[in-house]
Image: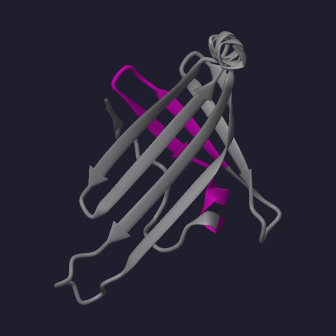
Amino acid sequence: MKKNLFLIIALLISGNVFAAIDHYVLRDGNTVRHLKVTKINDEYTVSADVNFESAANEADSEHCSADITGKAKSTGKNELVMKKHSESKASFCELKIQLGPNGAKVEESKDCATFTVGKCHFSSDGKELIRVK
């Protein structure tokens, strides 16, 4: 009896929570960008990462990897803005995300350089990250 009551309450509560997770990926040469947008009710969380690895036969072989995660706000139809405070400097990295039906574009503020090194950056350079279904 207690199990049935608990199950009914759990179903009622879970029916009020709407959650969605979308993944976007862009491979551009030796750079791979990944974006994850999580929406629970009306709250967004954004996670972005970038990985760059030069070819093994290049003399100047460099690589980098960076990621950033934070709460985002909707600033318009299909637009999100995430601001992340740098722990080492008094600056904010701001990612502006334009969501489309099949992908997303990411722009970053100049202060995002405190979160990345080398050739790594979160911006998609006008290219669209493809939505993974």
State the residue lying farthest toward the right: 90
Which residue appears at 45% of the width and 65% of the height?
A: 120
Name the residue nearer the viewer: 17 or 25. 17
Q: x, y (%) of residue 3? A: 66, 20
Residue interval drawn in magenta: 94-114
Q: Residue furthest left?
A: 57
- The picture places residue 132, in percent across and down from the top left corner, at 32, 34
Instruction: Report the side of 90 relative to 128 (left or right).
Output: right
- Residue at x 62%, y 11% (from the top left corner): 15
Residue sitting at x 62%, y 65%: 115
Residue 94: x and y, percent? 66, 46
Q: Quadrant of residue 68?
A: bottom right
Q: Is residue 86 above or below residue 131?
A: below
Judged left or right of residue 107, residue 2 is right
113 sits to left or right of 131:
right
Quadrant, the C terminus: top left
Q: Quadrant of residue 16?
A: top right
Q: Residue furthest front?
A: 1
Q: Which residue extends farthest bottom?
A: 59
Name the residue rendered at 72%, 51% in the picture: 84
Front one among 16 and 115: 16
Image position of 24 (left or right of 98): left
Question: Is residue 104 a member of the stretch shown in magenta?
Answer: yes
